[in-house]
Amino acid sequence: MVIAALDSVYQVKVVLLPAKPPYKNAFTNFKGIRYRADTTIAMLRREKPDSMDYILGVTNSDICITKYAADGSIKNPVNKYTDFGIFGLGYRPGPSSVISTYRLGDFNTLLAKERLAKVSVHELGHNFGLPHCPDKKCVMTDAVESIATVDNALLRLCEKCKRRLK
């Protein structure tokens, strides 16, 4: 479903690379077993084959980031936003992103697979330079810490985001 979604939205060729374990240097145990998404996309960027323009890592491990306020301090409450669990992260623009199935639900359901497709399209959109979109139906809308936002978005770009890509 992910490959079909990426092809449908962006018309990109997708190559599936061999599976590998999460990066050990991305591991954190501050709030349970998680892997830093920022460290992961930096490692993916370094290891991306030269023959590829972008790399999207997919994991079933929980991934996290630290969320910062506009002044550069950790967002309040600090305990909540340090190693904050997320669905995905991608450089904007940049060659790498990572998504996790961990927070998307039971993978025996169509809903979880649709969520994975949407998060994949969203993070690759960031790699292509797209920012978060105010259109709540656009796949580039900010999840605002809620899976319901992902569910509400459609698996498509709004017209404004399509124009930005051109």
Image (tube, rainbow, N blue to C red):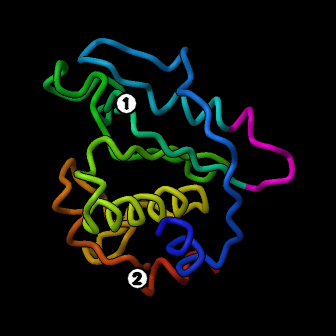
Is 38 on the left-hand or right-hand side of 11?
Answer: left
Q: 156 above or below 76?
A: below
Numbered-mark total: 2
Q: In the image as oriented, which residue stretches furthest toward the right?
A: 51
In front: 50, or 157? Answer: 50
Residue 142 location (% of width, % of height): 30, 58
Q: Which of the two labelled residues, at mark 1 and mark 2, occupies the earlier sequence position? A: 1
Q: What residue span does the magenta drawing correspond to?
A: 45-53
The residue identified by callout 1 is 65
Residue 74 location (% of width, % of height): 28, 23
The residue identified by callout 2 is 158
User: Which residue: 49% across, 65% down?
Assistant: 2
In the image, is residue 36 part of the stretch drawn in magenta? Answer: no
In the image, is residue 51 part of the stretch drawn in magenta? Answer: yes
Label 2 Cα crowd, 10 Å radius (few <14 / some 14-19 / many 20+): some
User: Which residue: 38% across, 15% down?
Assistant: 28
Q: In the image as oriented, which residue stretches furthest toward the front?
A: 108
In front: 94, or 147? Answer: 147
Q: Amino acid at mark 1?
A: Ile
Question: Do labels 1 and 2 touch, CB within 8 Å?
Answer: no
State whether the magenta stretch is mostly helix, strand or loop: loop
The CA span between labels 1 and 2 is 27 Å
Q: In the image as oriented, which residue stretches furthest toward the bottom?
A: 159
Is 141 on the left-hand or right-hand side of 126?
Answer: left
Residue 166 location (% of width, % of height): 64, 81
User: Which residue: 45% across, 44% down?
Assistant: 89
User: Which residue: 55% across, 46% down?
Assistant: 97
Label 1 Cα crowd, 10 Å radius (few <14 / some 14-19 / many 20+): some
Q: Quadrant of residue 4?
A: bottom right
The secondary element bearing badge 2 is classed as loop
